[in-house]
Image (cartoon, rainbow, N blue to C red):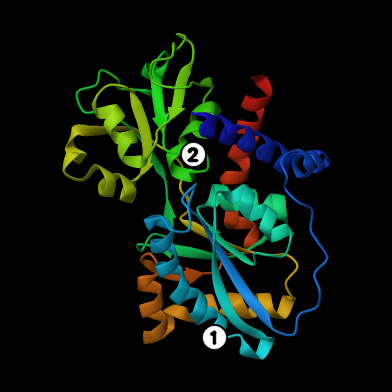
Amino acid sequence: MYYHIYMKKLVIIAVLALLAGGVLWFVLTQYNVAPALPQAEEKEIVLFIAEPIGGNTADSPVFQASGKEYNPFIKYVASKLASYGVKDGNFVAVQNPYEASTLMRQGKLDIYVDSPFPAYVVAKLAGAEPIANRWKREQEFYHSNIFVKKDSPIKTLDDLKGKMMVFQKPDSTSAYFLPKAELIKRGYTFTQKTGPGDKVLPNEIGYYFASGDVEEFQDVLTGRAAASAQNDVDFKAIAGKDADNYRFIFSTIDVFRHVVVIRAGLDSKLKNAIKQILLDMDKTPEGQKILSDFKKTTKFSAFLPNAETAFKGISELTALIEKEIIGQ
């Protein structure tokens, strides 16, 4: 419970910082998001790429699995950059995008790969630049679906008023940010609760965070929560044989599946080289094998007509989340 409340505070501060650059110093000083440190000139460069794994420790199965999937990808990219002074590549596990922002500002993290909302946070807090769109499981775009139990009396979004929703985690694009922001856009009021037993007022939608994605689904199935949200692919994977026991009542806008952002302080020639390596990976058998093993990545593609489209939809909805925060 305290972790989710703390995460909410981080989300609040981060979103405010995104849209009000003048208060970024507050984030940096009050939440230990360290300022960028001057970096010594390096003759041999090690490329660092991160993934958020929550509070899992280095000896946890989650950490081990993430490292196993990331390392071949990182080593492949680094091996193509010897002429730029890159000698190796390492995997860095971070708890959340805020830690990633800190490391990137300190020059200790070069590349961050995540769904568009946390990637947007890192881009704004650390000045990172989007360079490529990662197609995951053949998806270039995805959206979120709000779902209820199949026999639930809830048919429309209006029926959620006075009810409790459960979300996966505060930095999830499809299992938190998109559904919440879309409903706020339509005039609904969200109030975070500590758990499913808290009181929800008739004119609001209450929500809390589950202890895991499986628990999120179970809470809806057992009636502890009236609804939840998830993207199509993860919904099928998590619900499994119970998928027919749920029903969708709303789908959000489409956003890019995953966004790759790169540290602003890297040499521009090195940035362009990394981008081109990513874009060319699906064109060779070796690259295709690395991509497939890298969490079912199909390919990387460029943002068209330019990088500004990387966060289309996300940046507009973030403003709505800020308004909700200010109103609380």
Query: In 3D space, how far apart are the residues under numbered discs 2 and 1 (Cα atoms)?
Result: 37 Å
- In the rendered image, the residue lying farthest to the front is 59
Q: Earlier in the sequence, mark 2 or mark 1?
A: 1
67 vs 127, left or right, is left
- The three-letter code of the residue at mark 1 reads Ser
Query: Which residue is found at the position 54% from the left and 86% from the top?
Result: 79
Q: Which residue is mark 1?
A: 79
Q: Residue 223 at x, y = what percent? A: 27, 21
- The three-letter code of the residue at mark 2 reads Leu
Q: Residue 139 at x, y = what percent? A: 38, 59
Q: Is residue 105 visible?
A: yes
CB atoms at circles 2 and 1 under 8 Å apart? no
Query: Which residue is found at the position 35% from the left and 66% from the top?
Result: 296
Query: Which residue is found at the position 46% from the left and 79% from the top?
Result: 281
- In the rendered image, the residue lying farthest to the bottom is 83
Q: Toward the viewer: 78 or 2?
A: 2
Q: Quadrant of residue 202?
A: top left
Q: Which residue is mark 2?
A: 178
User: The C terminus appears in which quarter of the rendering?
Assistant: top right
Mark 1 packing: few (<14 Cα in 10 Å), some, or many (20+)? some
Mark 2 packing: few (<14 Cα in 10 Å), some, or many (20+)? many
